[in-house]
Image: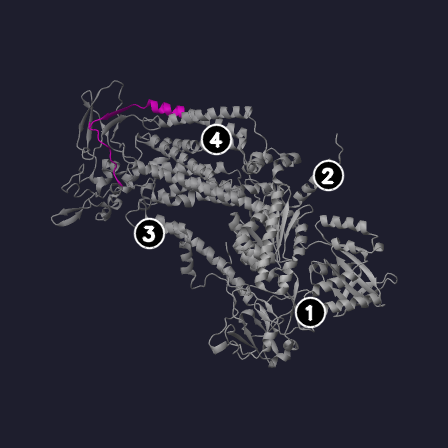
Amino acid sequence: MTFFSSYRFLNCIIYRIHSRFTQQELPAWKPILTPGWVITSFLAIAFLFIPIGLVSLFASERVVEIVYRYDQDCVPEMYRGNVYVKSRSDKQLRSAAYESSTKECEPEARFNKSGDPVPIVPCGLIAWSLFNDTYNLIKKDKVLNINKKGIAWKSDTKVKFGSNVYPKNFQSNDLIGGGKLNESIPLSKQEDLIVWMRTAALPTFRKLYGKINTSLEAHDTITVVLENNYNTYSFGGQKKLVLSTTSWIGGKNDFLGIAYLTVGGICLFMALNFILLYVFKPRPLGDPSYLSWNRKAAN
Amino acid sequence: MGTGRNKRVHFSKIYSFQCGRRRYDDDGSQIGGPGFSRVVYCNETSGVSEVAAGGQSYYADNYMRSTKYTPMSFFPKSLFEQFRRVANFFFLVTAILSFTDLAPYSAVSAVLPLIVVIAASMIKEGIEDWQRKQQDHEVNNRKVKVHRGEGVFESRQWKKLKVGDIVKVEKDEFFPADLLLLSSSYEDAICYVETMNLDGETNLKLKQSLEATSTINNDSNFSNFKAAVKCEDPNATIPDVDEETGKVTYEAESPDEAAFVIAARELGFEFYKRTQTTVSFFELDPVSKKRVERTYELLNVLEFNSARKRMSVIVKNDDGKLLLLSKGADSVMFARLAKNGREFEENTKKHVNQYADAGLRTLILAYRELTDEEYEAFNEKFTEAKNSVSADRDDLIDEATAEIEKDLILLGATAVEDKLQKGVPECIDKLAQAGIKIWVLTGDKMETAINIGFSCSLLREGMKQITIILESPEIIAAEKEGDENVIAKISKESVKKQILAGKAQLSASTSEAFALIIDGKSLAYALRDSIKDTFLELAVGCASVICCRSSPKQKALVTRLVKEGTGKTTLAIGDGANDVGMLQEADIGIGISGVEGMQAVMSSDIAIAQFRFLERLLLVHGHWCYRRISSMICYFFYKNIVFGTTIFFYEAYASFSGQAAYNDWYLSLYNVFFTSLPAIALGVFDQDVSARFCLKFPLLYQEGVQNTLFRWRRIFGWMLNGLASSVIIFFLCIRALDPEAYNKNGKTAGLEVVGTTIYTCVVWVVNCQMALAVNYFTLIQHIFIWGGIILWYLFLLGYGAMPATISTTAYKVFVETLAPAPSYWFVTLFASIAALIPYFCYNAVQMRFFPAYHGMIQWIRHEGNCEDPEYVQMVRQRSIRTTTVGYTARSIARDNTLSHLNLERQPPK
């Protein structure tokens, strides 16, 4: 008995919901942009954005950054094209079993070893153009230790670059594009290569070279001894060395903070404007005479 | 859409021999001859009945198929249909391109969504066609009694009927085949056929069989029956023969008469028998209080015609007393009353006016006693007139009848409410308020049409009626002559003259409401190329237009004239097969399902059960749909511009290298998962104004008519908004994340970080924009809008967790690189708010200071003014104009006239 009555009760509810759904009479919230909503929204955004902007700006301000351009040439920039970005074999990088899957790597796929084309590991133009300038930082005649471990993402060192894949026939062709690799170290440990192989978003990009774990004081003089190996002159690129600290927000970037402050300010301004507008220019209540079709009829 | 546009349904007509008699008397030498190649041999039960002349060809069977596909053709044909759509074809091309090296995305990500979409539409097609098949099955397997041979009738399915079979159709049956009447159970071998679906006329048509076959009304008679029927070849001038149906039904000549019979029974006069010469009643004897049987001998029927506007009968009762009973229009009847017959004249006039105002059809009843001499004199003259063959026969009859129909004694008046469907006047009133122009295209007689016009307030007292008919003396004279060319010429001239006169009337007065009434005959000339534009101008200037006696073809032609001549959207609504042409010609065809069969419904775009549902269909669903679709399209522009422009900007930054900013699957799932559901919710559920207010403020419908929500300004506005959003998102992301380190570990943002962040912002902005644009949130909206965003994060997690071979650049991108970086979250928060501010400002100002009509109604609802009649009236003030139709307009017109009169009566101060 109870079962049947509750079953019927449930049925009744389902029927009612169903009919409300099909009749498009579901309970609905119907907000409209009343002055209250508008002013509250603007004020809320302002009070949220201005503090965030200040905090971000403060974090960015604390970051110390030194940028030094060392190639001294100024030629139009050129981006690594689609052919370039695709010229890599993720399979080959991941596992020794796929050593010879170099289809996507042309023209840097194979090395002609006495008439017998053997695969290049790592193949492709990206690896071929590996950045190979080196920097030594000296402070008061003492070489600063640059930690080159942990500059790559874990997903790369653990998964995407195999620990059983060793460089082979790399930079063996006549045309040499960049740095060479130690053939006795597996790719998963070659963090410079791994960092280089992650595609940058834009033509002007920065790559992490290493971390200095020694504290540096203000007014310290640092001497940089660099090897200018990497050829940017052929395509007219520029090279810069950046020394920077980081904060929770990353490097020295004021943009986000300024953007937050700007929009927060605009919202505050809009809130005030709307308050004034609502006070001094009350809405002409429901006069449909100026609706487009009525205007047409009146003329 | 077009559920039945290409149906091959053969509806049918019953043929009688009335006008073909002469031809059938000859010896059959024309059989097989030119123009008569089709010969049917009847009752060849052995199965050789279908041999045509020469014995080569067979007639098609009676199987009806309305499905679009067969099991064999379904796959190729529906696939073809799918790729005939431009959008599907486009995606097919991109899918093919994705297999080449040119594409920056993988083939699977392009093909899979296409397959899903195509498969879904094909399944839908399949289900629809299956339903059509079921319907066909039902019609084809309906049973009919067919002569098997030896005088035995067996029941057989309609689909198995062959040409030449003899069938027995019973009362109230539909027959989906062309039939030839052989005999009937009535004495004179007559039957009554309703041809509502054929020509729109509601009255019953009498069909009589050939004398030779009329006696064969016993089953056994058919055992030896043989006949050959030759048919004229299909003639292009009668294209509607194949799409007609008939019905045998209740035998009153018009619904009015049926109403009178029923009313009389309620008052104690029960009609129970009618022979050729007598009418019998059970009457309540006022003295004995018993039911007695009375029989009246019917001596003469003085028929109704539109000139006389009355009809009389002369009967002789049991006592031998002669009575003339007359009924007719008030305009002619009051003039024919005797001096001593005007006792109730004032009261009756008052009542009749009240009835007419309420939209009822009124008749005046009167009688007079005749002396034998009077009757003899009349009968002689009347019979002579009837038997005369001269051209002025009708005049003679009119003269004879006019002499006897005088000195009548007024009995009273009747008022019959037209059997309009429930809610029709209310519906028409609302539609008129919504600014919809209403034309009535009917097969009914002019009188009936005008009466219906009054009862649904399309016509009213004080409205100037412009009537275009072909009844001038010279036309009647020409018709008597019978020269078709002359008739056509004179008729055309006359119609043209009447149209021009109407236009002159129209331009002479700007404030008055006009009604145009035109009959089918005149319409045929008015629709000729040379005058149709003038006709249209006249018709457009009138508040209501009624075309009566119009054929199915004329209905379609009038619809086309309006559609093409005015460039406006036309909607046709009808319930009969005779409306099919019109329904298909109009931009929107609405079929009313019901007693008239399913043809109208099957050829319509939308089917409703009753006329009055049109009000809700247009004012509520029409408005909602218009808003939903236009908003949805604008929104689609918006969200794809936001998305597409970010890709474009990135390309510009990447020197157009073809490198895509986003992972393949982000690209292909954008429109499928993360942003489509809110758009669907908008397109299906959004309501700017609730149904109640849509009906309360019919003028809201004008938003659609004026196309305020889908003009170029609005579309460009949304595009601009999309551009603004994408600029804000893109430049914020690339400047905030690049080129400096983006997290605490000093790692720089690669393409996967920047791309995914931009994408996250786009998903947020586009969904929040939706939340801002709609002001109707049910649970569904919440689930879809916020669900789209949640789905994106779930997708990032799930896709990122897949092996790197599948997820490629998205491998662990959220868990490892994005989620731990505060800058990612701050960029998202900033973009999803900042990108919406331009729209928010615009909307806040617009809603408050320049609200559209729906906006005003939202304010009314919000401020709770909807119960304040004065306020509501003010908002509605402009929606009702005196030159429109409907009962609201009628009452306003009446009030105006009254106040006008009052003003005139007031003495000058």
Callout 2: SS = helix
Query: Which amino acid type is shown beneath numbered disc 2?
Result: Leu
Looking at the rendered structure, the kind of residue marked 1 is: Val
Residue at mark 4 to residue at mark 1: CA–CA distance: 86 Å
B55 displayed left or right of B469: left
Chain at numbered mark 1 = B
Instruction: Identify the chain of the residue marked 4, using the numbered disc in the image.
Output: B
- Helix or strand or loop: what does disc 3 sit on? helix
Q: Is residue A79 magenta?
A: yes
Q: Nearer the viewer, residue A145 or B312?
A: B312
Where does the image place residue A290, in percent across and percent down from the top left?
A: 56, 34
Cβ–Cβ below 8 Å for labels 3 and 4? no
**Mark 1 element type:** loop
The label number, if any, that marks residue B901 in the structure image: 2
Segment colored magenta: A53-81
Q: CA distance from mark 3 to mark 2?
A: 78 Å
Earlier in the chain: of badge 3 and badge 4, it is: 3
* For discs 4 and 2, the disc positioned in front in the rendered view: 2
Sequence-wise, the earlier of marks 3 and 2 is 3
Q: Which residue is mark 1?
A: B389
Badge 1 density bin: few <14, some 14–19, many ≥20, Cα 10 Å: few
Residues at discs 4 and 1 both on one chain:
yes
Task: Give the residue pinned by disc 3.
Answer: B96
Mark 4 sits on what residue? B841
Please determine if labels 3 and 4 lie on a single subunit: yes
Examine the image and state in which quarter residue B254 appears: bottom right
